[in-house]
Image (cartoon, grey):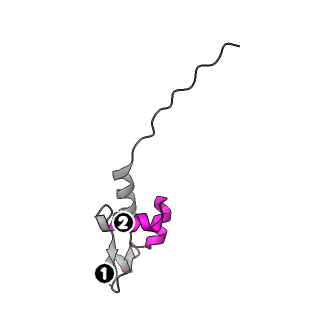
């Protein structure tokens, strides 16, 4: 096995990584296949993600929330 796998850097399965990112497994799998998120493939084909992979992806897709202006109070 690769050094990263044996020392715990690739701790997240695809299902776990999807939960961390707040998406379904299918969405994460699609993003991976399109090359949007880095991953590591174990012998046998299993996919793993590191915390760094998830954080990098999150930072690359972060968009600040729009500022919502409060409604003016009615003079009543």
What residue is shown at x 31% (from left), y 61% (from top)? Answer: 36
| Magenta portion: prevailing SS class | helix
Numbered badge on residue 2: 1
Is-magenta flag for residue 68?
no
Could you say which is closer to the camera, residue 44 or residue 56? 44
Q: Which residue lies under the disc numbered 2?
A: 30
Tell me the quarter of the image containing the N terminus.
bottom left
**Residue 45's x, y, as percent?**
35, 82
Could you say which is closer to the camera, residue 53 or residue 6? 53
Is-magenta flag for residue 30?
yes
User: Alpha-carbon distance for marks 1 and 2?
Assistant: 25 Å
**Residue 4's x, y, as percent?**
34, 75
The 10 Å Cα crowd at callout 1, few under 14, some 14 to 19, many 20 or more, is few
Q: Which residues are magenta?
A: 6-32
* Residue 12 appearing in the image: no
Name the front one of labels 1 and 2. Answer: 2
Image height of 47 relative to 20, above or below = below
Q: As drawn, is 68 to the left or to the right of 45?
A: right
Could you say which is closer to the camera, residue 74 or residue 20? 74
What residue is shown at x 33% (from left), y 74% (from top)? Answer: 40
What residue is shown at x 33% (from left), y 52% (from top)? Answer: 60
The 10 Å Cα crowd at callout 2, few under 14, some 14 to 19, many 20 or more, is few
* Residue 8 appearing in the image: yes
Q: As drawn, is 71 to the left or to the right of 4?
A: right
Which sits earlier in the primary sequence, circle 1 or circle 2?
Answer: 1
Which type of secondary structure does the marked residue at label 2 adopt? helix
**Residue 11's x, y, as percent?**
43, 73
Which type of secondary structure does the marked residue at label 1 adopt? loop
Tell me the quarter of the image containing the C terminus.
top right
Image height of 28 relative to 5, above or below = above
**Residue 10's x, y, as percent?**
39, 73
């Amino acid at each position: 096995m690769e050094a990263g796998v044996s020392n715990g850097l690739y701790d997240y399965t695809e299902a776990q990584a999807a939960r961390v990112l707040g998406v379904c497994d299918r969405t994460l799998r699609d993003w991976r296949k399109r090359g949007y998120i880095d991953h590591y493939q174990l012998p046998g084909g299993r996919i793993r993600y590191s915390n760094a992979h998830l954080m990098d992806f999150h930072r690359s897709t972060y968009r600040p929330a729009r500022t919502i202006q409060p409604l003016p109070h009615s003079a009543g």
